[in-house]
Image (cartoon, rainbow, N blue to C red):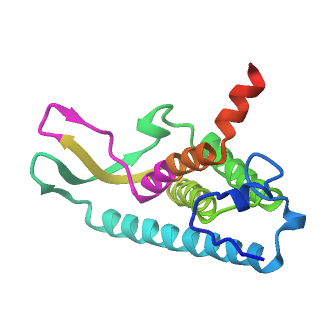
Amino acid sequence: MQKGQDNGFPSKLVTSKITNTVGEDKSKVSPGKYRGGLRLLLIVVALVVILDQLSKLWINANQPQTELLPGFLDLRYTKNYGAIFGLFSNHTELFIALGIAASVIILVFLYYFPPATTVGILSFALILSGAVGNLIDRIRLGYVIDFISIHVQELFRWPAFNIADAALTVGILTLIYYFYKLGVFRKAHEHNH
């Protein structure tokens, strides 16, 4: 019997075992594979959260306003009292509650529907670490420290962000790609037609 290897993407071997739209039925996942996925998830979350928090501690202590790549990339200390792009400012308690709820939902979801591949695990790990990194700021400071500023001269300026925001964005994009490779969107489209 030939064993399939996890190259990060669902293969025919893996997708034949998929019992839901996200991953394998937990009862059919070997304990070793489940523990390996959990270990990877915890390592990624810990590394990203630590990197995020250390960078914010340094930024908070130094409060730089520095051009790194002239006309393109700056370090700009910014306090974000809102959500993404500074929207809905001064609702800290709501954002704390939403951050906790999102983190719990992700953990419960992962417990019952573990991803079938490394890409799935990494996408959820990045989303969780981004949520936790910004949640720590909101609980500790009442706002989120942003500091990465991307712009094109003065023609276009993306709102400042941080490592947690970047992890969250990459995690969401990777999760969309993971769902696409699993055929979730095709199955949903076929179901609706």
Front one among 2 and 186: 2
Q: Residue furthest right?
A: 27
Front one among 163 and 87: 163
Q: Residue furthest left?
A: 70
Q: Is residue 169 above or below residue 41?
A: above
Q: Position of residue 68 (x, y in %)?
A: 15, 58
Image label count: 0
Q: Position of residue 2 (x, y in %)?
A: 72, 75
Q: Name which residue lies at 20% across and 53% down.
A: 74
Residue 61: image quadrant is bottom left
Q: Is residue 10 above or below residue 28?
A: above
Range covered by the magenta-colored residues: 152-170
Q: Residue furthest bottom?
A: 32
Quadrant placement of the N terminus = bottom right
Q: Position of residue 41 (x, y in %)?
A: 63, 69
Residue 96 sits inside the magenta stretch: no
> Left or right of 10: which side holds 78?
left
Residue 115 seen in this snapshot: no
> Left or right of 110: which side holds 55?
left
Front one among 98 and 40: 40
Residue 154 sits inside the magenta stretch: yes
Q: Residue furthest top?
A: 193
> Left or right of 99: which side holds 14?
right
Q: Name which residue lies at 69% across and 77% down.
A: 36
Quadrant placement of the C terminus = top right
Q: Name which residue lies at 79% across and 54% down.
A: 18
Residue 45 seen in this snapshot: yes
Q: Position of residue 174 (x, y in %)?
A: 52, 51
